[in-house]
């Protein structure tokens, strides 16, 4: 943990306490430390309510931990920054703006030069397959298309780290696989680092270089595994014996922690 500048993301001894209605403090996160290398794809698994979203919000700078520190490129995280883009499961677009203007919104906020804004926006609409819908309003988009819009709106600010909080959780099975393939394509083309929260073992194994497993609240890291599958990965990978065996091992391990 001492060689912070050589790692894009360093979480050091993160703990988070919240106060209930009676004024009593309870711990959600307990002493979490991990490192993520530049360009790595790491997934976070854990039971519902264990603090996965809270962990992402701390790394994004949306909330401050009770104890511990986060560093990105050697700089301490205290506030949100465009270098850390976050995509939530429940994406809420600006319904009164077109798809193009939704993506452009972040550039306006960050005072990006107006002469170059449209070129950048159209680049990312093409990347997520929404170019033909640029003049439409979000109300006509399907759930998967809205998540594509969420990703484009985040990518347009050129973040070094993408933080994704179960972004495909509400999608049907076929759309989820399409979105997974799209995410891997974006990850490759943008050369960014991804921290991805999911409860889906297939998703974690298919996407990740490494998986961090969190335990029950107050959550701690109970296991880390390196995913052994070579890239590029095809959807058929999930039917291989090695994939199914590793999936089963993870399922048994996680189930034993929940019991």
Image (cartoon, rainbow, N blue to C red):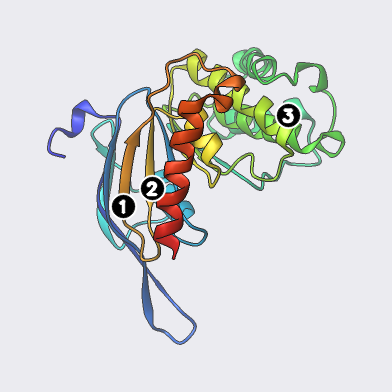
Name which of mark 3 and mark 2 comes first in the sequence: 3
| Kind of element beneath mark 1 | strand
**The image quarter in which residue 212 lies:** top left
| Kind of element beneath mark 2 | strand
Q: Nearer the viewer, mark 3 or mark 2?
A: 2
**Of the pair 244 and 68, the residue shown nearer to us:** 244
Residue 80 visible from this viewpoint: no
Tell me if residue 60 comes above or below residue 209 in the rendering: below
Mark 1 near mark 2, Cβ–Cβ under 8 Å?
yes
- Distance, label 3 to label 1, CA atoms, is 43 Å
In the rendered image, residue 249, in percent from the top left (x then y), is placed at: 42, 42
The residue drawn where x is 73% and y is 31% is 174
The residue drawn where x is 38% and y is 83% is 24
Q: Which mark is residue 101?
A: 3
Name which of mark 1 and mark 2 comes first in the sequence: 2
Q: Which mark is residue 222?
A: 1
Say few, some or many: other residues with alpha carbon within 10 Å of mark 2 (under 14 / 14 to 19 / 20 or more). Answer: many
Q: Is residue 50 left or right of residue 124?
A: left
Q: Is residue 114 left or right of residue 258?
A: right
In the rendered image, residue 207, in percent from the top left (x then y), is placed at: 50, 28
**The image quarter in which residue 234 lies:** top right
In the rendered image, residue 94, in percent from the top left (x then y), is placed at: 74, 41
The residue drawn where x is 50% and y is 13% is 232
**Residue at mark 2:** 213
- Distance, label 3 to label 2, CA atoms, is 38 Å
**Of the pair 70 and 184, the residue shown nearer to us:** 184
**The image quarter in which residue 37 lies:** top left
């Amino acid at each position: 943990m001492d060689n912070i500048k050589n790692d894009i993301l360093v979480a050091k001894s993160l703990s988070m306490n919240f106060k209930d209605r009676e004024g009593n403090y309870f711990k959600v996160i307990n002493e979490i430390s991990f490192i993520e290398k530049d360009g790595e794809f790491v997934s976070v698994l854990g039971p519902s309510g264990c603090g996965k979203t809270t962990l992402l919000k701390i790394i994004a700078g949306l909330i401050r931990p009770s104890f511990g520190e986060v560093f990105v490129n050697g700089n301490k995280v205290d506030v949100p920054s465009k270098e850390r883009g976050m995509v939530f499961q429940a994406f809420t677009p600006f319904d009164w703006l077109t798809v193009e203007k939704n993506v452009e919104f972040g550039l306006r906020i960050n005072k990006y030069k107006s002469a170059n804004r449209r070129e950048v926006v159209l680049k990312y609409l093409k990347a997520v397959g929404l170019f033909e819908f640029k003049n439409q309003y979000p109300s006509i988009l399907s759930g998967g298309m809205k998540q594509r819009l969420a990703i484009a709106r985040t990518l347009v600010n050129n973040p070094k780290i993408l933080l994704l909080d179960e972004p495909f959780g509400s999608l049907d099975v076929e759309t989820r696989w399409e979105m997974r393939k799209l995410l891997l394509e974006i990850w490759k083309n943008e050369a960014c680092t991804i921290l991805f929260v999911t409860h889906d073992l297939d998703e974690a194994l298919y996407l990740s270089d490494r998986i961090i497993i969190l335990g029950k609240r107050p959550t701690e890291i109970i296991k880390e595994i390196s995913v052994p599958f070579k890239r590029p990965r095809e959807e058929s990978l999930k039917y291989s014996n090695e994939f199914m065996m590793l999936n089963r091992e993870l399922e048994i391990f996680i189930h034993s922690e929940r019991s």
